[in-house]
Amino acid sequence: MKNTKVWIIKDEHDEQLIEAAKILKEGGTVAFPTETVYGLGANALLDEAVSGIYEAKGRPSDNPLIVHIADLSLLDELVEHAPYQEELIQAFWPGAITLIFKSKGKVAARVSPGLDTQSIRMPKHPVAKKLIQLAGVPVAAPSANLSGKPSPTDGKHVIEDLNGRVDGIVVYDQSDVGLESTILDLTQSPPMLLRPGGVTVEDIEAVIGKIQIDPALEKKMSENVQPRAPGMKYTHYSPEADVTVVNGPLDEMVKKIQELHDSHTSSVGIMCSDETKDRYKAENIISLGSRESLEEVASNLFKTLRQFDEIGVDIVLAEGYDTVGMGKAIMNRLNKAAGYQVINV
């Protein structure tokens, strides 16, 4: 049990970040806000520090980590040059996209177990950027939650999951995007999407042309396959409740969810949208926002899954979304939260 230090900061100029950065540099584990979700960081150059991430989260040992940088000059030190990197960096960094390169082997082996590649992101969040700058080292950081649970978008979620497990937690604001970063593998030709996120397929293709979509995004990955990026292999983002996703035309979806609700004797939650929330007869209904604003839906997804845990429901019935734009990332997270338990109507 660690004596976790919690820093509640005002902004990126808060002097408490100096202490947090010192702990990071010296091999400790520190959770901090980013624009996607809260991350759990450790010095990416130290194997023992990186091991602390896996231990704190209970993370499977073959699940790779993303290295976060605040200075582009570090890129050439850590990885080989890749096609399209200049165009993508100019368009989207700092921001919610992770790029995969061939590794130069400079970071700790546990960052990318069994792989010759390295995932790199430059976060846009001012506190994340400042913390990494102050630490002066590349920072390996997955989401700051217990492995398998919904990723945290608020400092209180991090404290609930990791207090006593990590050395420090930096608490600031709620994450804007609300979903982990997009992951694009530049070692493939053309580049391949391994995880959808805040930077959409349409955004990427507008810059570099057609990309590949990893077939693994549409199904559960086999247990004996080595994942090339975080979030690919394991059931993720799951609340305590059993989640079922219902896809189809809006009217049919609402009808099916109501039928499923009425057929259960246990406590049921319905996760819906502003357009449908008044059409259900149920006690536990939470809207993610309007279908006209998928960014709002995405930013509320993990927070809402945690709300259902707080209410104490046994089952969550979730509406599906069209897989265009941010809808692709939303459905990726929903399907994983449900363990691919999906009903199409």
Image (cartoon, grey):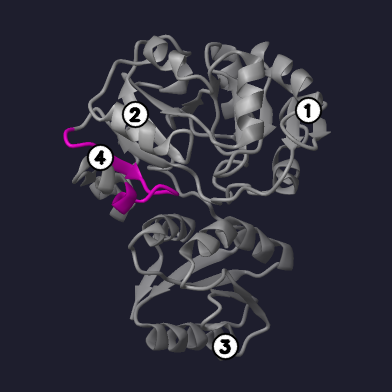
Query: Does the magenta portion include 190?
Result: yes
Q: Quadrant of residue 106?
A: top left
Q: Which amino acid is tagged 4?
A: Met
Q: Which one is in front, 285 or 85?
A: 85
Residue at point 30%, 53% (across, down) = 202
Q: Quadrant of residue 270?
A: bottom right
Query: Does the magenta portion include 328?
Result: no
Q: Which amino acid is tagged 2?
A: Ile
For marks 1 and 4, the one nearer the N-term is 1
Pair 1/4: label in front: 4
* Mark 1 closeness class: few <14, some 14–19, many ≥20 residues within 10 Å: few
Q: CA distance from mark 2 to mark 4?
A: 10 Å
Q: CA distance from mark 3 to mark 1?
A: 45 Å
The residue tagged 1 is: 1
Q: Magenta region: which residues? A: 189-203
In x, y percent, where is residue 115? 33, 22
For marks 3 and 2, the one nearer the N-term is 2
Q: CA distance from mark 4 to mark 3?
A: 40 Å
